[in-house]
Amino acid sequence: MRVTALLLALLSPAAWAAEESAMNAADVSWMMVATTLVLFMTIPGIALFYAGMVRKKNVLSVVMQSFAICCSITIVWYVCGYSLAFTEGNFFIGGFDKVFLHGIGINTMQGSIPEMLFMMFQMTFAILTPALMCGAFAERMKFSALFLFMVLWSLFCYVPICHWVWGPDGWLAAAGALDYAGGTVVHINAGVAGLVACLMLGKRIGYGKEAMAPHNLILAMVGACFLWIGWFGFNGGSGLAADGRAVMAIVVSQIAAAAAALIWMACEYVENKRFTVLGAISGAVAGLVAITPASGFVEPAPALFIGLCGGFICYFGATRLKHWLGYDDSLDAFGVHGVGGIAGAILTGVFASEAITGSAMKPVLEQVWIQTESVIATLIYASIVTYVLLKLVDVMIGIRVSAEEERMGLDLSLHGERVE
């Protein structure tokens, strides 16, 4: 009788109304828009951004990489990625309670939005992160190897770090690390993994001897603009609410992007006496990367400083560091995302404001040290896991195309298609 009464109570309209009453229509509407904007950052944002910067014979290969990553990581996230990242487990990884989204219905809530929407929003982050990495080793990796590596990397690298920072019992979250929208989880993670990959793959044939100018800067500009617009969902949606903090996250993102683009352009002019389209869009992305971890914690004035620092530091990371150290980061994935993510994560500790967070902040030096710990932990773990996974894939199927395939171009040699 008690079981019957319980079932009747759960199935009654009053019970459903109680479930639905926690839902905020404005928050749901904004988060649906934000989720769409973040997906838009990968397809077509990153796809076009990278397509414009590679040589013509490799345009379709980088577009295909972004599209395939979107498809494969969607399934990984649905099967077990979300559960391992966002359910309680231990300090390192979550549990299996929500594999295949088990137990998540249309009325299961995450704060004021359906948990299914929260899952989808986080899925777009899991898709974007490995897509960003591809810029470091563009024009020389086997598609089959990339496909397998990205699935493994998502499970063994992205998911654990995501749990550390944003999971209910992650150790960096417990330590007080601040990462509003993915400075460590997305940008440092993707940047250092890309660096390891480009080192393991080696330089492109002719690197440093042949011209490897971008094929179509109009495509790159369009992709960068899509990224800039999509970033409003990336940063603005990370509070999961349509409120003043979301507005502030968008405002500081705009300011930082503009400041970084201007400082990059200024650096170019001082050094080369010219302003370039590639420099302007690279600077804007650098500013967006740098402000990402701080976007829900800072006011406009610090955002201006973070943008200027991000643009200046990433300019030298993209134009000098790789030449000094001799590695071939094809599209400056580490130079922009890795370097910018590190700068932004540490500066978050300097400028995080109680006026924005609404809660007491730790002393600056203590918070900066916590931020530095999170950066170091991400760098070490992502480097080791990326190296091990690439070694495994290399043993299984090989990771680099042949010299003949590379000279022909990956569009024809791997996909049997080409851009006319």
Image: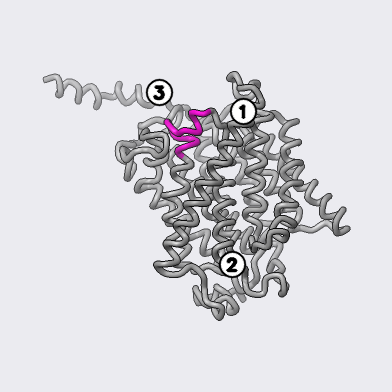
Magenta span dominant secondary structure: helix
Instruction: From the image, state whether disc 3 or disc 2 is nearer to you.
Output: 2
Question: In the rendered structure, does residue 166 fall within the stretch colored magenta?
Answer: yes
- Position of residue 128 measured from the top left corner of the image (x, y, whole percent): 53, 50
Q: Mark 1 to mark 3: distance in Å? A: 38 Å
Point out which mark residue 202 bears.
2
Question: Quarter of the image containing the N terminus?
Answer: top left
Horizontal side, residue 411 vs residue 13: left or right:
right
Q: Mark 3 to mark 2: distance in Å? A: 56 Å
Instruction: From the image, state whether disc 1 or disc 3 is nearer to you.
Output: 1
Horizontal side, residue 1 vs residue 321: left or right:
left
Label 3 packing within 10 angstroms: few (<14), some (14-19), many (20+): few
Point out which mark residue 106 bears.
none
Question: Quarter of the image containing the C terminus?
Answer: bottom right
For label 1, the SS is helix
Q: Residue at x 40, y 47 (%)?
A: 77
Start and end of the magenta stretch?
Answer: 163-175
Give, as a three-letter code, the residue at label 3. Ser
- Position of residue 50 measured from the top left corner of the image (x, y, whole percent): 62, 60
Q: Which residue is mark 1?
A: 367
- Position of residue 136 measured from the top left corner of the image (x, y, whole percent): 60, 59
> Which of marks 1 and 2 precedes in the sequence?
2
Give, as a three-letter code, the residue at label 2. Gly
Q: Which residue is mark 3?
A: 21
